[in-house]
Amino acid sequence: MPNCEEYELLISARLDGALSPEESARLEAHLAGCPQCRRLAAELGGLKTLWDELPLVQPPADLNSRIMEAVRRDNVVPLIPSEYRKKPLQWKRWAASAAVLAVILIGAGGLRLSHSGSAPQSAGLASVQENAAAPANANPENGITGFGAAAPEARDAAPDSDAAKAEGQPSTGLTLSLPPQVQALSLCADQAFPGWQTDESAATDAGQETFSLPLVLPDGSRWTLSCGEADASGQYPVTCQSGETSAHYLVDLAAGTVTPESP
Amino acid sequence: MTEQELVAAARSGDPDAFARLVEANQTKVYNLAYRMTGNPEDAADLTQEAFLNAWRGLARFGGQSAFSTWLYRLTSNACIDFLRRQGRRETLSMTVEENGDEARQAERPDERWSPERELERREAKEALEAGLAALSPDHRQVLLLRELEGLSYSEIAQSLALEEGTVKSRIARARLALRDFLKKSGNFSGPPPSKD
Protein backbone atom coordinates (compact mmCIF):
# COMPACT_ATOMS: atom_id res chain seq x y z
CA MET A 1 0.00 0.00 0.00
CA PRO A 2 1.96 2.99 -1.18
CA ASN A 3 1.66 6.05 1.00
CA CYS A 4 -0.97 4.43 3.16
CA GLU A 5 1.27 3.76 6.16
CA GLU A 6 0.54 7.20 7.48
CA TYR A 7 -3.17 6.54 7.14
CA GLU A 8 -2.90 3.20 8.89
CA LEU A 9 -1.76 5.16 11.92
CA LEU A 10 -4.69 7.53 11.62
CA ILE A 11 -7.17 4.71 11.17
CA SER A 12 -5.93 3.16 14.39
CA ALA A 13 -5.94 6.47 16.26
CA ARG A 14 -9.46 7.16 15.14
CA LEU A 15 -10.60 4.01 16.92
CA ASP A 16 -9.33 5.60 20.11
CA GLY A 17 -10.91 8.97 19.43
CA ALA A 18 -7.46 10.46 19.25
CA LEU A 19 -7.68 12.38 15.99
CA SER A 20 -7.59 16.12 15.67
CA PRO A 21 -10.29 17.63 13.43
CA GLU A 22 -7.64 18.28 10.80
CA GLU A 23 -6.41 14.70 10.89
CA SER A 24 -9.94 13.41 10.80
CA ALA A 25 -10.75 15.43 7.69
CA ARG A 26 -7.59 14.29 6.01
CA LEU A 27 -8.36 10.68 6.73
CA GLU A 28 -11.91 10.94 5.45
CA ALA A 29 -10.65 12.46 2.23
CA HIS A 30 -8.17 9.63 1.79
CA LEU A 31 -10.65 6.89 2.57
CA ALA A 32 -13.02 8.21 -0.04
CA GLY A 33 -10.46 7.30 -2.68
CA CYS A 34 -8.70 4.23 -1.19
CA PRO A 35 -10.50 0.86 -1.02
CA GLN A 36 -7.62 -0.86 0.75
CA CYS A 37 -7.67 1.63 3.57
CA ARG A 38 -11.43 1.43 3.74
CA ARG A 39 -11.13 -2.32 4.16
CA LEU A 40 -8.46 -1.91 6.82
CA ALA A 41 -10.64 0.56 8.69
CA ALA A 42 -13.50 -1.93 8.63
CA GLU A 43 -11.27 -4.79 9.77
CA LEU A 44 -9.77 -2.88 12.64
CA GLY A 45 -13.24 -1.77 13.63
CA GLY A 46 -14.29 -5.41 13.69
CA LEU A 47 -11.31 -6.23 15.88
CA LYS A 48 -12.39 -3.65 18.38
CA THR A 49 -15.68 -5.45 18.97
CA LEU A 50 -13.76 -8.63 19.78
CA TRP A 51 -12.54 -6.97 22.89
CA ASP A 52 -16.06 -6.68 24.18
CA GLU A 53 -16.17 -10.44 24.24
CA LEU A 54 -13.14 -10.74 26.46
CA PRO A 55 -14.49 -11.29 29.94
CA LEU A 56 -13.19 -9.61 33.03
CA VAL A 57 -11.62 -12.32 35.14
CA GLN A 58 -12.10 -12.41 38.88
CA PRO A 59 -8.88 -12.87 40.85
CA PRO A 60 -8.69 -15.69 43.40
CA ALA A 61 -10.65 -14.90 46.56
CA ASP A 62 -7.60 -14.97 48.79
CA LEU A 63 -5.46 -12.72 46.64
CA ASN A 64 -5.98 -9.65 48.79
CA SER A 65 -5.05 -11.46 51.98
CA ARG A 66 -2.03 -13.03 50.31
CA ILE A 67 -0.85 -9.63 49.19
CA MET A 68 -1.42 -8.01 52.57
CA GLU A 69 0.34 -10.85 54.31
CA ALA A 70 3.38 -10.21 52.17
CA VAL A 71 3.08 -6.48 52.77
CA ARG A 72 2.86 -6.82 56.53
CA ARG A 73 5.74 -9.24 56.59
CA ASP A 74 7.74 -6.75 54.59
CA ASN A 75 7.12 -4.08 57.20
CA VAL A 76 9.92 -5.37 59.38
CA VAL A 77 13.01 -3.35 58.70
CA PRO A 78 15.80 -5.79 58.14
CA LEU A 79 19.06 -5.44 59.96
CA ILE A 80 21.49 -3.96 57.54
CA PRO A 81 24.60 -6.10 57.84
CA SER A 82 26.81 -3.25 56.69
CA GLU A 83 26.06 -1.36 59.86
CA TYR A 84 27.82 -4.06 61.74
CA ARG A 85 30.65 -4.53 59.35
CA LYS A 86 33.95 -4.50 61.09
CA LYS A 87 36.43 -1.86 60.12
CA PRO A 88 40.12 -2.37 60.80
CA LEU A 89 39.80 0.03 63.74
CA GLN A 90 37.18 -2.07 65.41
CA TRP A 91 39.03 -5.21 64.57
CA LYS A 92 41.94 -4.03 66.61
CA ARG A 93 39.68 -3.46 69.58
CA TRP A 94 38.45 -6.97 69.12
CA ALA A 95 42.00 -8.18 68.93
CA ALA A 96 42.90 -6.37 72.12
CA SER A 97 39.99 -7.85 73.98
CA ALA A 98 40.69 -11.22 72.54
CA ALA A 99 44.24 -10.84 73.65
CA VAL A 100 42.89 -10.53 77.15
CA LEU A 101 41.16 -13.80 76.76
CA ALA A 102 44.24 -15.30 75.21
CA VAL A 103 46.17 -14.35 78.31
CA ILE A 104 43.68 -16.17 80.44
CA LEU A 105 43.49 -19.21 78.33
CA ILE A 106 46.91 -19.51 76.86
CA GLY A 107 49.01 -18.81 79.88
CA ALA A 108 50.74 -21.85 81.22
CA GLY A 109 49.12 -23.31 84.26
CA GLY A 110 45.54 -22.80 83.37
CA LEU A 111 43.21 -19.95 83.95
CA ARG A 112 44.07 -16.82 85.71
CA LEU A 113 42.70 -13.35 85.64
CA SER A 114 45.60 -11.10 84.80
CA HIS A 115 43.52 -8.05 84.57
CA SER A 116 40.00 -6.88 84.84
CA GLY A 117 39.57 -4.40 82.06
CA SER A 118 36.21 -2.73 81.67
CA ALA A 119 32.95 -4.27 82.75
CA PRO A 120 31.76 -5.97 79.57
CA GLN A 121 35.06 -7.70 79.26
CA SER A 122 34.98 -8.96 82.79
CA ALA A 123 31.59 -10.40 82.27
CA GLY A 124 32.91 -12.05 79.19
CA LEU A 125 35.86 -13.44 81.06
CA ALA A 126 33.70 -14.99 83.69
CA SER A 127 31.62 -16.74 81.12
CA VAL A 128 34.71 -17.94 79.36
CA GLN A 129 35.80 -19.73 82.45
CA GLU A 130 32.60 -21.64 82.56
CA ASN A 131 32.06 -22.36 78.96
CA ALA A 132 34.75 -21.96 76.46
CA ALA A 133 32.37 -22.30 73.59
CA ALA A 134 30.44 -19.14 74.48
CA PRO A 135 31.72 -16.18 72.56
CA ALA A 136 32.76 -13.70 75.17
CA ASN A 137 32.47 -9.97 74.71
CA ALA A 138 30.18 -10.65 71.82
CA ASN A 139 28.91 -7.19 71.18
CA PRO A 140 28.41 -5.61 67.82
CA GLU A 141 29.48 -2.25 69.12
CA ASN A 142 32.99 -3.22 69.95
CA GLY A 143 33.21 -5.30 66.91
CA ILE A 144 33.12 -8.70 68.47
CA THR A 145 30.69 -11.26 67.30
CA GLY A 146 32.50 -14.14 68.77
CA PHE A 147 35.84 -15.68 68.28
CA GLY A 148 37.21 -18.42 66.21
CA ALA A 149 34.96 -19.51 63.45
CA ALA A 150 32.21 -17.24 64.65
CA ALA A 151 34.02 -14.06 63.75
CA PRO A 152 33.97 -13.97 60.01
CA GLU A 153 33.64 -10.21 59.89
CA ALA A 154 36.81 -9.85 61.89
CA ARG A 155 38.53 -12.08 59.41
CA ASP A 156 37.18 -10.12 56.51
CA ALA A 157 38.31 -6.80 57.92
CA ALA A 158 41.83 -8.05 58.50
CA PRO A 159 42.62 -10.03 55.44
CA ASP A 160 46.02 -10.98 56.61
CA SER A 161 44.82 -12.54 59.79
CA ASP A 162 45.54 -16.15 60.39
CA ALA A 163 42.43 -16.66 62.38
CA ALA A 164 41.58 -19.77 60.51
CA LYS A 165 44.95 -21.28 61.09
CA ALA A 166 45.61 -20.43 64.68
CA GLU A 167 44.43 -23.18 66.93
CA GLY A 168 44.33 -23.17 70.68
CA GLN A 169 47.58 -23.55 72.55
CA PRO A 170 48.34 -26.91 74.12
CA SER A 171 48.10 -25.86 77.72
CA THR A 172 44.41 -25.25 77.77
CA GLY A 173 42.83 -27.95 75.71
CA LEU A 174 40.50 -25.33 74.29
CA THR A 175 40.29 -24.54 70.64
CA LEU A 176 40.77 -20.89 69.93
CA SER A 177 41.12 -19.47 66.48
CA LEU A 178 43.01 -16.39 67.48
CA PRO A 179 45.44 -14.97 65.02
CA PRO A 180 48.98 -15.82 66.11
CA GLN A 181 49.88 -12.14 66.26
CA VAL A 182 47.18 -11.66 68.86
CA GLN A 183 48.52 -14.55 70.84
CA ALA A 184 52.02 -13.19 70.52
CA LEU A 185 50.90 -9.80 71.78
CA SER A 186 49.17 -11.22 74.80
CA LEU A 187 52.05 -13.49 75.66
CA CYS A 188 54.49 -10.64 75.39
CA ALA A 189 52.35 -8.36 77.48
CA ASP A 190 51.96 -10.94 80.14
CA GLN A 191 55.60 -11.74 80.43
CA ALA A 192 57.14 -8.33 79.81
CA PHE A 193 54.51 -6.12 81.44
CA PRO A 194 53.03 -7.88 84.40
CA GLY A 195 49.93 -6.27 85.78
CA TRP A 196 49.04 -4.72 82.47
CA GLN A 197 45.58 -3.65 81.53
CA THR A 198 44.16 -2.79 78.15
CA ASP A 199 44.29 0.92 77.66
CA GLU A 200 40.74 1.72 76.68
CA SER A 201 41.49 5.38 76.34
CA ALA A 202 44.19 4.89 73.77
CA ALA A 203 43.36 6.43 70.44
CA THR A 204 43.65 3.75 67.84
CA ASP A 205 45.28 4.68 64.61
CA ALA A 206 42.85 3.77 61.86
CA GLY A 207 45.56 3.82 59.28
CA GLN A 208 47.61 1.13 60.92
CA GLU A 209 47.43 -2.27 59.46
CA THR A 210 49.46 -4.07 62.09
CA PHE A 211 48.13 -5.83 65.12
CA SER A 212 48.43 -3.63 68.14
CA LEU A 213 47.61 -3.69 71.82
CA PRO A 214 47.53 -0.51 73.90
CA LEU A 215 48.44 -1.10 77.52
CA VAL A 216 48.38 0.81 80.74
CA LEU A 217 50.58 -0.42 83.58
CA PRO A 218 50.00 -0.28 87.31
CA ASP A 219 52.35 2.69 87.51
CA GLY A 220 50.19 4.52 85.02
CA SER A 221 52.59 4.37 82.12
CA ARG A 222 51.14 3.58 78.75
CA TRP A 223 52.58 1.35 76.14
CA THR A 224 51.57 0.27 72.67
CA LEU A 225 52.57 -3.18 71.58
CA SER A 226 52.66 -3.97 67.91
CA CYS A 227 53.18 -7.35 66.39
CA GLY A 228 54.57 -7.90 62.94
CA GLU A 229 54.79 -10.82 60.60
CA ALA A 230 56.58 -13.96 61.71
CA ASP A 231 60.24 -14.00 60.84
CA ALA A 232 62.13 -16.80 59.15
CA SER A 233 62.28 -18.81 62.34
CA GLY A 234 58.57 -18.48 62.92
CA GLN A 235 58.86 -16.09 65.80
CA TYR A 236 56.81 -12.94 66.03
CA PRO A 237 58.47 -9.56 66.55
CA VAL A 238 56.71 -7.35 69.04
CA THR A 239 57.62 -3.71 69.31
CA CYS A 240 56.69 -1.93 72.52
CA GLN A 241 56.47 1.81 72.42
CA SER A 242 55.96 4.30 75.20
CA GLY A 243 56.57 7.85 74.20
CA GLU A 244 60.13 7.85 73.02
CA THR A 245 61.03 4.60 74.73
CA SER A 246 60.83 1.38 72.83
CA ALA A 247 61.56 -2.23 73.50
CA HIS A 248 61.60 -5.23 71.21
CA TYR A 249 60.81 -8.83 71.81
CA LEU A 250 60.61 -12.00 69.85
CA VAL A 251 57.74 -14.27 70.73
CA ASP A 252 57.94 -17.97 70.16
CA LEU A 253 54.40 -19.21 70.39
CA ALA A 254 55.25 -22.85 70.22
CA ALA A 255 57.70 -22.61 73.05
CA GLY A 256 55.74 -19.98 74.91
CA THR A 257 58.76 -17.75 75.30
CA VAL A 258 59.25 -14.02 75.02
CA THR A 259 62.81 -13.00 74.34
CA PRO A 260 64.01 -9.40 74.48
CA GLU A 261 66.19 -8.32 71.65
CA SER A 262 68.10 -5.21 70.85
CA PRO A 263 66.39 -3.05 68.26
CA MET B 1 -10.97 8.54 52.04
CA THR B 2 -9.90 9.61 48.60
CA GLU B 3 -7.24 7.73 46.73
CA GLN B 4 -4.80 10.52 47.51
CA GLU B 5 -5.53 10.27 51.21
CA LEU B 6 -5.14 6.52 51.13
CA VAL B 7 -1.84 6.83 49.34
CA ALA B 8 -0.61 9.39 51.85
CA ALA B 9 -1.61 7.16 54.75
CA ALA B 10 -0.05 4.11 53.16
CA ARG B 11 3.11 6.08 52.50
CA SER B 12 3.49 6.81 56.17
CA GLY B 13 3.34 3.10 56.85
CA ASP B 14 -0.35 2.38 57.33
CA PRO B 15 -0.95 -1.11 55.92
CA ASP B 16 -4.72 -0.86 56.30
CA ALA B 17 -4.82 2.11 53.97
CA PHE B 18 -2.74 0.14 51.53
CA ALA B 19 -5.12 -2.81 51.86
CA ARG B 20 -7.90 -0.58 50.62
CA LEU B 21 -5.79 0.49 47.65
CA VAL B 22 -5.21 -3.18 46.92
CA GLU B 23 -8.93 -3.87 47.10
CA ALA B 24 -9.70 -1.04 44.71
CA ASN B 25 -7.10 -2.02 42.12
CA GLN B 26 -6.49 -5.72 42.35
CA THR B 27 -8.99 -6.81 39.70
CA LYS B 28 -7.57 -4.43 37.13
CA VAL B 29 -4.03 -5.46 37.91
CA TYR B 30 -4.89 -9.13 37.93
CA ASN B 31 -6.61 -8.92 34.57
CA LEU B 32 -3.64 -7.22 33.01
CA ALA B 33 -1.32 -9.86 34.39
CA TYR B 34 -3.68 -12.63 33.36
CA ARG B 35 -4.03 -11.41 29.81
CA MET B 36 -0.29 -10.88 29.58
CA THR B 37 0.59 -14.36 30.75
CA GLY B 38 -2.51 -16.42 30.05
CA ASN B 39 -2.00 -18.22 33.33
CA PRO B 40 -4.01 -17.62 36.52
CA GLU B 41 -1.24 -18.72 38.90
CA ASP B 42 1.35 -16.54 37.21
CA ALA B 43 -1.14 -13.72 37.16
CA ALA B 44 -1.71 -14.02 40.91
CA ASP B 45 2.03 -14.10 41.59
CA LEU B 46 2.68 -11.12 39.38
CA THR B 47 -0.19 -9.20 40.95
CA GLN B 48 1.29 -9.82 44.36
CA GLU B 49 4.71 -8.78 43.09
CA ALA B 50 3.32 -5.57 41.63
CA PHE B 51 1.57 -4.59 44.86
CA LEU B 52 4.58 -5.48 46.96
CA ASN B 53 6.74 -3.30 44.73
CA ALA B 54 4.17 -0.57 45.09
CA TRP B 55 4.30 -0.86 48.88
CA ARG B 56 8.07 -0.72 48.91
CA GLY B 57 8.23 2.08 46.38
CA LEU B 58 5.58 4.32 47.91
CA ALA B 59 8.20 6.80 49.01
CA ARG B 60 9.13 7.26 45.36
CA PHE B 61 5.58 7.68 44.14
CA GLY B 62 5.16 11.41 44.05
CA GLY B 63 1.54 11.51 42.96
CA GLN B 64 2.38 12.90 39.53
CA SER B 65 0.09 10.33 38.04
CA ALA B 66 -2.88 8.42 39.30
CA PHE B 67 -1.99 5.62 41.62
CA SER B 68 -3.40 3.08 39.20
CA THR B 69 -1.25 4.43 36.37
CA TRP B 70 1.81 3.87 38.49
CA LEU B 71 0.49 0.47 39.45
CA TYR B 72 0.11 -0.43 35.79
CA ARG B 73 3.72 0.48 35.25
CA LEU B 74 4.80 -1.83 38.04
CA THR B 75 2.54 -4.58 36.74
CA SER B 76 3.73 -4.17 33.15
CA ASN B 77 7.34 -4.27 34.21
CA ALA B 78 6.78 -7.36 36.30
CA CYS B 79 4.95 -9.09 33.43
CA ILE B 80 7.50 -8.18 30.79
CA ASP B 81 10.35 -9.32 33.02
CA PHE B 82 8.49 -12.51 33.72
CA LEU B 83 7.88 -13.20 30.05
CA ARG B 84 11.49 -12.48 29.19
CA ARG B 85 12.65 -14.90 31.86
CA GLN B 86 10.32 -17.50 30.46
CA GLY B 87 11.90 -16.87 27.09
CA ARG B 88 8.74 -17.75 25.33
CA ARG B 89 7.14 -16.05 22.37
CA GLU B 90 3.82 -17.78 22.41
CA THR B 91 3.29 -17.56 26.09
CA LEU B 92 -0.41 -17.83 26.54
CA SER B 93 -1.80 -21.15 27.44
CA MET B 94 -5.32 -21.38 26.20
CA THR B 95 -7.18 -21.60 29.46
CA VAL B 96 -10.45 -21.50 27.70
CA GLU B 97 -12.93 -23.11 30.05
CA GLU B 98 -11.44 -22.11 33.36
CA ASN B 99 -12.88 -18.76 34.00
CA GLY B 100 -15.31 -18.16 31.26
CA ASP B 101 -18.88 -18.74 32.31
CA GLU B 102 -19.02 -17.27 35.77
CA ALA B 103 -17.16 -14.15 34.84
CA ARG B 104 -19.17 -13.65 31.72
CA GLN B 105 -22.49 -13.94 33.45
CA ALA B 106 -21.35 -11.69 36.24
CA GLU B 107 -20.39 -9.17 33.64
CA ARG B 108 -23.58 -9.18 31.63
CA PRO B 109 -26.40 -10.21 33.86
CA ASP B 110 -29.07 -8.47 31.85
CA GLU B 111 -28.39 -9.69 28.34
CA ARG B 112 -30.56 -12.44 27.04
CA TRP B 113 -28.64 -15.61 26.71
CA SER B 114 -28.89 -17.74 23.64
CA PRO B 115 -26.79 -20.67 22.50
CA GLU B 116 -25.89 -19.00 19.25
CA ARG B 117 -24.86 -15.83 20.95
CA GLU B 118 -22.90 -17.86 23.48
CA LEU B 119 -21.08 -19.71 20.73
CA GLU B 120 -20.27 -16.50 18.92
CA ARG B 121 -18.94 -15.07 22.12
CA ARG B 122 -16.82 -18.06 22.86
CA GLU B 123 -15.37 -18.12 19.37
CA ALA B 124 -14.63 -14.45 19.53
CA LYS B 125 -12.99 -14.80 22.90
CA GLU B 126 -10.87 -17.72 21.77
CA ALA B 127 -9.88 -15.92 18.64
CA LEU B 128 -8.77 -12.90 20.57
CA GLU B 129 -6.92 -14.96 23.14
CA ALA B 130 -5.10 -16.78 20.37
CA GLY B 131 -4.28 -13.49 18.73
CA LEU B 132 -2.95 -12.02 21.95
CA ALA B 133 -0.79 -15.06 22.49
CA ALA B 134 0.77 -14.54 19.08
CA LEU B 135 1.69 -10.92 19.71
CA SER B 136 5.04 -9.82 21.02
CA PRO B 137 4.96 -8.90 24.72
CA ASP B 138 5.42 -5.23 23.88
CA HIS B 139 2.49 -5.23 21.47
CA ARG B 140 0.36 -7.26 23.82
CA GLN B 141 1.14 -4.94 26.71
CA VAL B 142 0.24 -1.74 24.93
CA LEU B 143 -2.92 -3.18 23.43
CA LEU B 144 -4.10 -4.51 26.79
CA LEU B 145 -3.58 -1.18 28.47
CA ARG B 146 -5.62 0.52 25.75
CA GLU B 147 -8.40 -2.00 25.18
CA LEU B 148 -8.63 -3.88 28.44
CA GLU B 149 -7.77 -1.17 30.94
CA GLY B 150 -9.08 1.71 28.86
CA LEU B 151 -6.09 3.94 29.42
CA SER B 152 -5.60 6.97 27.22
CA TYR B 153 -2.49 7.38 25.10
CA SER B 154 -1.20 9.84 27.66
CA GLU B 155 -1.80 7.47 30.56
CA ILE B 156 -0.16 4.62 28.68
CA ALA B 157 2.78 6.86 27.90
CA GLN B 158 3.11 7.59 31.61
CA SER B 159 2.77 3.97 32.58
CA LEU B 160 5.36 2.70 30.16
CA ALA B 161 7.64 5.74 30.20
CA LEU B 162 7.22 6.22 26.47
CA GLU B 163 6.47 9.16 24.22
CA GLU B 164 2.83 9.49 23.24
CA GLY B 165 3.74 9.25 19.57
CA THR B 166 5.44 5.94 20.30
CA VAL B 167 2.35 4.69 22.07
CA LYS B 168 0.18 5.70 19.15
CA SER B 169 2.29 3.93 16.55
CA ARG B 170 2.87 0.89 18.71
CA ILE B 171 -0.85 0.41 19.19
CA ALA B 172 -1.41 0.73 15.45
CA ARG B 173 1.24 -1.87 14.72
CA ALA B 174 -0.16 -4.16 17.40
CA ARG B 175 -3.60 -3.96 15.84
CA LEU B 176 -2.19 -4.71 12.41
CA ALA B 177 -0.27 -7.67 13.77
CA LEU B 178 -3.40 -8.95 15.45
CA ARG B 179 -5.41 -8.60 12.30
CA ASP B 180 -2.74 -10.37 10.23
CA PHE B 181 -2.61 -13.28 12.63
CA LEU B 182 -6.34 -13.70 12.78
CA LYS B 183 -6.69 -13.55 9.02
CA LYS B 184 -3.95 -16.12 8.58
CA SER B 185 -5.37 -18.48 11.17
CA GLY B 186 -8.79 -18.24 9.59
CA ASN B 187 -10.28 -16.89 12.76
CA PHE B 188 -11.10 -13.64 11.27
CA SER B 189 -14.18 -13.49 9.21
CA GLY B 190 -13.27 -10.08 7.90
CA PRO B 191 -15.29 -6.96 8.03
CA PRO B 192 -19.06 -7.14 8.16
CA PRO B 193 -20.63 -6.76 4.72
CA SER B 194 -21.00 -3.12 3.84
CA LYS B 195 -21.81 -1.06 0.89
CA ASP B 196 -18.71 -0.21 -0.97
Image (spheres, helix red, strand yellow):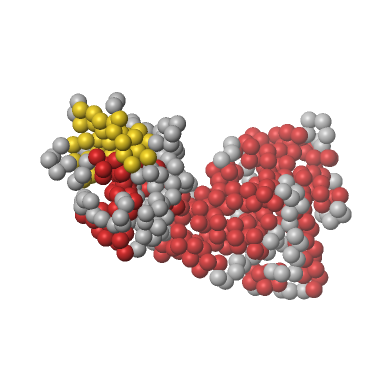
Q: Position of residue A21 (x, y in %)?
A: 63, 38
Relative side of B144 to A245, left or right: right
Between residues B24 and A195, which one lies in front from this camera angle? A195
Q: Residue at x 62, y 56 (%)?
A: B32
Asked if residue A81 can be seen in this view, the reply is no
Q: Quadrant of the C terminus of chain A?
A: top left
Q: Residue at x 29, y 40 (%)?
A: A188
**Residue A196 in which image quadrant:** top left
Between residues B134 and B100, which one lies in front from this camera angle? B134
Q: Residue at x 31, y 36 (%)?
A: A259
Relative side of A145 to B132, left or right: left
B176 up-or-down from B44: above or below: above
Between residues A20 and A95, which one lies in front from this camera angle? A95
Q: Position of residue B116 (x, y in %)?
A: 81, 70
The count of marks equals 0
Q: Position of residue A256 (x, y in %)?
A: 35, 44
Q: Quadrant of the N terminus of chain A?
A: top right
Q: Residue at x 43, y 36 (%)?
A: A234
**Residue A136 in which image quadrant:** bottom left
Relative side of A206 to B170, left or right: left
Residue extending farthest to the left is: A219
Q: Position of residue B82 (x, y in %)?
A: 64, 51
Asked if residue A53 can be seen in this view, the reply is yes
Between residues A142 and A212, which one lies in front from this camera angle? A212
